Image: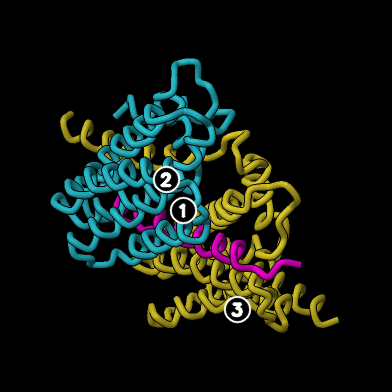
Amino acid sequence: MKANMKRWERYTALGAVLLALVPAIALAHQETGQITGFLSGFEHPISGLDHVLAMVAVGLWGAVLGPPAIWVLPVAFPMMMAVGGLLGLLGIPLSGVEIGIAISALVLGAMVLAELHPPLWLAAVIVGFFAIFHGHAHGRELPEGTSALLYSFGFVVATGLLHAVGILLGEAHRWPKGRQAVRVGGGGVALAGLFFLWRAVA
Amino acid sequence: MAFVVLSAVVAAPAHAHLVETGFGAFYDGIAHLAVTPTDLLVVVALALLAGQRGTRAARQTVFALPVAWWVSGIIGAHWPALAALSLLTTLPFALAGVLVALNAKVWDAGVVAFAIAAGVLHGLTNGATLTVADSGGLALGGVVSGIFFLTTILSAEVVALPTGWPQIVVRVAGSWIAATGLLMLGWLARPMP
């Protein structure tokens, strides 16, 4: 009973951390457009299938690799994505962004399909490298009258949640049939990546 | 703890910056903290960092951050011109987020010095804003109380977290804050069209 209470308190604490971030979504402030800023940023990563699949694939691959990759990859991706966004905002050009995004889906899907287990640092480098393209592509557009900070926050939160979806789906990997399903999912992402690549170069 | 959760939920529908909550300037100050994402993020990030570094760092930060914020808030109220610090108020939460994400082994004194520096920068801005809103010292007291409350709760909870997933969630939260900060730095530094 006491142990359950302690566990409850821990989960409540984590909930409090997340909820403490929620009040930022206020409607009016001297920095106007806060709610639209957050929602615009939140919508951005989920508005393109190529981005969605790649980000879910990061979570899937993390789940396939297991700890510590299961959390290192989803931590590396948003941070490197932000670096990509920073480059875009500073006007530093990056050629072949769409191609890079397509290849990210292709490669990450293939990793899941083949259940490849590279060293952790290499997996993080692969994920971080592709994250730069995703950040660069989406980090440049701020809708008029919105809060840049909450736009960025919404953008990052949506990305993190997509990774979480990937991790949750990837947890099916623990069971034989789930493992096959995850591999099939990886294959689907890779195929979609191939399609995006064809579309990007066509 | 339930009260903290409830407070966070209740704070969510805040509708204005330095709005009149109807409860007076002190509560307007608390509301100000709740609706100012830059301030909120730096407080959360520093509380997470202090909690990660252990009890001593957390105890010191719990006092260092609000006191620095309060003192510089008074200075900012008298010399509002000092408060054009958008870039400088973004840097602290971006950096704190990076440190949390990396679970960096920062010395206790380093955490406290960081908290003081962040408190000074944000306090200057707050002081100027509150002066413009003509809310005076009581509103600043509300802001500082909110910071103390939030820092205490969060850092204490992080200190008490067991190893494993709960601590990883803290690092993930740090990475999100860091990524947000990096993007924000880009918005601030981008060339004007």
Label 2 environment density (alpha carbons within 10 Å; few <14, some 14–19, many ≥20): many
Q: Which of marks 2 and 1 is nearer the N terminus?
A: 2
Q: Residue furthest left?
A: B56
Q: Can residue B76 be seen in this view?
A: yes
The overriding secondary structure of the stretch rendered in magenta is: helix
Q: Colour of chain B?
A: cyan
Report if the CB atoms under discs 2 and 3 are less than 8 Å apart: no
**Residue A82 at x, y = what percent?**
55, 66
**Chain identifier of the residue bearing label 1 in the image:** B
The residue shown at (55%, 56%) is A156
Q: Name the residue under label 2.
A: B76
Q: Is mark 2 on a helix, strand or loop?
A: helix
The kind of residue on which mark 2 rests is Gly
Q: Mark 3 points at which residue?
A: A107
Please tell me the numbered disc located at residue B82: 1
Report if the CB atoms under discs 2 and 1 are less than 8 Å apart: yes
**Residue A12 at x, y = what percent?**
33, 35
In front here: A40 or A63?
A40
Left/right of residue A138 with respect to residue B45 in the rendered view: right
Magenta segment range?
B165-193
Q: Which chain is yellow?
A: A
